[in-house]
Image: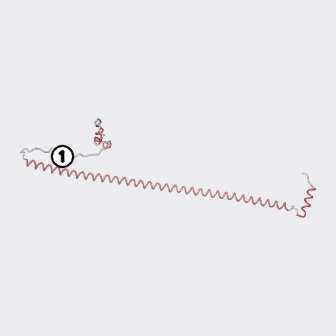
Amino acid sequence: MALSASRPQLLVRPFLRGFHASAQALARVEPHDFSKPSEYLGSWEPSAAGDPREAWARLERLRKRYAHDVRGLRRQYAYEVQLLEAERQRKAEARAEAARIANEERKAAKAAAAQTRAAERRAFELDFRQALMKERAQKLESWREKEKLKAQKKAEDRELLRRKSSMWVAEDKLETKVLQAIMHTTPL
């Protein structure tokens, strides 16, 4: 597949994307101290005498001074980077410590809430058991009363049966009593 020459913006767009400033980079405001203008730039002046050895010596001194200044700037930059890294690390440790403290407080609050819930649950269970025991005692008392009434009724039935049984007829007199009852009927 050949590249289309009619749409060059598709080829150029990925290259240009790196040159665009992002919104975060534009919104970020950081204090910046600009260094002084370099003495190296624009410091070459042709000598009036035109001696090439003097020119080479001056050029060499300029190069050495420039290298010395660059080393100093690099040292300063490295020192500032270390300070920024130390500050970032200090902030990260402070955030971690704050998160740890918040986590401990959250765990303590959670444990306290669990203890109060457990105490409430124990109190509810105790009340429930007491109500259950009271209900069981009432049912047992009711059952005992019913059993007592049943026993009393049985005793009354037995007493009635005993009283009626005193009028019972012996076996040898049974036939005569039956014949007498048949012969002497009483109308209702």
Within-10-Å neighbours for mark 1: few <14, some 14–19, many 20+: few
Quadrant assignment, res 121: bottom right
Q: Which residue is mark 1?
A: 38
How far from the left and from the top, in percent, is residue 53?
8, 49
Of residues 91 and 5, which is closer to you in this image?
Answer: 5
Amino acid tagged 1: Ser
* Residue 183: x %, y % from top left: 93, 56
Q: Residue furthest top?
A: 6
Local SS, label 1: loop
Most distant residue in the right direction: 183
Percent coordinates x, y for residue 97 in the rendering: 38, 55
At horizontal 18% and vertical 46% (from top left) the residue drawn is: 38
Residue that lies at the very extreme toward the front in this rendered image: 1
Query: Left or right: where does residue 126 sit relative to residue 60?
Result: right
What is the tally of numbered marks visible in this picture? Answer: 1
Check the image and report above or below for 8 versus 88: above
State the image quarter where residue 162 is shown: bottom right
In the depicted view, which residue is nearer to us: 172 or 95?
172
